[in-house]
Structure formats: C-alpha cells, structure tokens
Image (cartoon, rainbow, N blue to C red):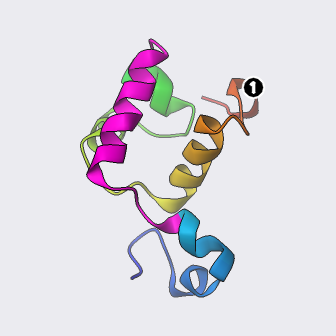
Amino acid sequence: MPNDFVSETMLARPNLQAALHQPPRAAHADLRQFRISKRESQEKFWGRFGVTQSSGSRFETGLAIPAPVAILLKLYVNGKLNDGDLQG
C-alpha cells in the first residue's frame, strides 16, 4: 500500500518490495538500542541520515520510516555504509 513516501511505481518494482516494508514495532526499539550502543544522541545519530532529532525519536517509538531513510539505515546497520559515506 503506498503512503506519502512510497509511490505506486516504486511498489511495482519487485526488487524494492522487501526493502520498503516497514519493520515491526520491536525493530524500532532495536534501532534505539543500536543508537544507544553507539553512545550517540538522537541528534547525532539521525542527523547523518538527514533526519531531525524529533523525527528520529518518533521513528524509535514506532512511526513509519520513509523509504529513502529506511534504505540508508539498513545499509548503515549492515555495514555497507559508514560515517564517511553519510553527511550529517
């Protein structure tokens, strides 16, 4: 189902289907734990993805993460991107 961040065209592309599904609420709590394990503030952690502290806080408590941010976040958590790759 499309939302403000995902268009019908994007949903029609099978290789993006899995990447665009939002994680369950527990995964959002895992994001918070990941950020805390890095000993970073919400402002610093989320800023590298172009996200405000306020929005980052909402993402950590269950708000759907926009697809572009979710993709960057997944690449970062999986070690495919590092701090040098992201400006923030």
| In the displayed structure image, the side of residue 83 where residue 19 appears, left or right | left
Decide: is 80 above or below 64. above
Residue drawn at 51 percent across, 80 percent down: 7
Q: Looking at the image, can residue 59 be seen?
A: no
Decide: is 74 above or below 38. below
Residue drawn at 57 percent across, 64 percent down: 19
Q: Which quadrant of the view contains residue 13? A: bottom right
- In the image, residue 46 lies at what x, y percent? 47, 32
- In the image, residue 5 lies at what x, y percent? 46, 68
Residue drawn at 56 percent across, 75 percent down: 17
Q: Is residue 30 magenta?
A: yes
Decide: is 6 above or below 85. below
- In the image, residue 11 lies at what x, y percent? 54, 82
| In the displayed structure image, the side of residue 53 where residue 8 appears, left or right | right
Q: Which image quarter holds the N terminus?
A: bottom left
- In the image, residue 86 lies at what x, y percent? 68, 33
Q: Is residue 72 or residue 5 the one in the foreground? A: 72
Q: Which image quarter holds the C terminus?
A: top right
Q: Which quadrant of the view contains residue 83? A: top right
Q: Which quadrant of the view contains residue 3? A: bottom left
Q: Identify residue for label 1.
A: 84
Disc 1 residue type (three-letter): Gly
Q: Looking at the image, can residue 29 be seen?
A: yes
Boundaries of the magenta span = 20-39
